[in-house]
Amino acid sequence: MTIYQDTKAGDIMNQYGLESPRAQEMIAAARAMGPALRSRAERCRIDQRVPDETVAEFHAAGFFKILQPEQWGGYAMDPQVFYSVGLEVAKNCPSSAWILGVIAVHNWQLAVFDDQAAQDVWGEDPTVLISSSYAPVGKVKVVDGGFRLSGRWSFSSGSQHCKWAFLGAVVPTAEAPFDMANYRTFLVPISDYRIVENWDVVGLQGTGSHDIVVDDVFVPEHRTHRSMDGFLCDNPGNVVNSAPLYRLPFMQVFVRAVCTATLGACEGALAAFIEVAQTRQAGPVKMKNDPFARQLAAQVRSSIEEMKLTMIRNFDAMMDCCRTGEEILIEDRVRYRYDSAVVADRCLALSSSMLKAAGSGGIRLDSELLAYHLDILASQAHVANHSTPFAINMGGVMFGEDNVDFAI
């Protein structure tokens, strides 16, 4: 954790950071939900959606408010708080943590849209939630005052709990029909789209990441957000949401929503591994007395704590820059992006080792260890957790080349 020397910065940290009483209360609340989340985990998988009572409990605990602007009743707290809560949830139900992460982070993104967009969504009810699918698959036509949008997007996690959706598309120009520099997020109300329930997967079943279909609807200019504004940390919403939190690069905030659930799931898998070790025979000795099992447990615990501290350290550094008005260096942003993406790779390797060490009992369908493993495996399929492109970009920057990725 960063130790702030400046009095004003220290006051801000105490109010909005991990050390604040509200942050500690929220983390404790997430931890206390553990038994209930675990008891619902099987139903969550079978129903292919997070139970309504879980979402209601997230609302009651204020989890959706953590990154929401204060003018809408939110807490505008540091991302470290948000993701610490997510880690606690993921230990017991990765699907619940996944939708909490990707839905609640949208309350941050809406704050960087033109303020009229927030008025549209929260004007009557500031608890309304937004789902998303950012793949640039939408078809866009430029018209007076905005755009006509059509398309079908996959993997909109938690969409059944939401009344609006963020959808990705590239705005064509005469010079460039498809240039990712012209990528935008389009904000669409549920009256303008339909959900196609087709989520049939081996892990993270409870996320209910169904398809969303839009058929030629009008989206006003103010309900779009340019990715380049997010990259430059200079967004229309900063006119009214000027707190340091809303000066962070968009992708640095969003990608932690999907790696955090994975990391928490790995911690849940470790707990399941330790439970198995109490009773399983490993040859002539109990597994808990087997030197290999002990060494593996220690390695997994150490790796999890290292990844947690890396995530906190990176946000500490970025928030320091946002509070002082300093630019976050590109080489640092490239590294932070890789640090996030590689979490899924590392967690899958750790989970695989534990599953193998648990023996044949680990592959039974009622195995908690297997359930966590499949959730981690499924999380690796998210493009934000595909580490290879980010490693290549980071290596190129280290070798003196220009950054080629604006999703940092």
Image (tube, rainbow, N blue to C red):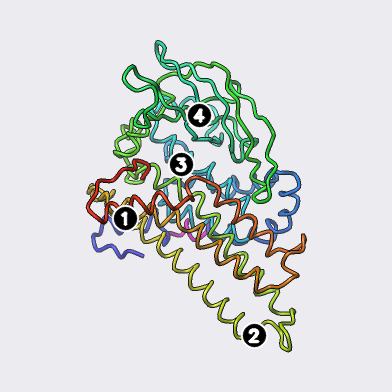
Residue bearing the label numbered 2: 290
Camera-side mark, 2 or 1: 1
Disc 2 and disc 1: Cα gap in Å? 40 Å
Q: Residue at x 60, y 65 (%)?
A: 352
Residue bearing the label numbered 4: 137
Q: Which residues are magenta?
A: 20-26
Q: Residue at x 65, y 68 (%)?
A: 355
Cβ–Cβ under 8 Å for marks 3 and 4: no
Q: Secondary structure at mark 3?
A: loop
Q: Secondary structure at mark 4?
A: strand
Q: Position of residue 187 (x, y in %)?
A: 49, 27
Quadrant holding the C terminus: top left
**Lower position in the chain sequence, tag 4 or tag 2:** 4
Camera-side mark, 1 or 3: 1
Disc 4 and disc 2: Cα gap in Å? 51 Å
Q: Amino acid under label 3?
A: Gln
Above or below residue 105? Residue 267 is below
**Lower position in the chain sequence, tag 2 or tag 1:** 2
Disc 1 and disc 3: Cα gap in Å? 35 Å
**Lower position in the chain sequence, tag 1 or tag 3:** 3
Residue bearing the label numbered 1: 395
Residue bearing the label numbered 3: 68
Cβ–Cβ under 8 Å for marks 2 and 1: no
Disc 4 and disc 1: Cα gap in Å? 29 Å
The quarter of the picture where residue 338 lies is bottom left
Q: Position of residue 175 (x, y in %)?
A: 31, 20
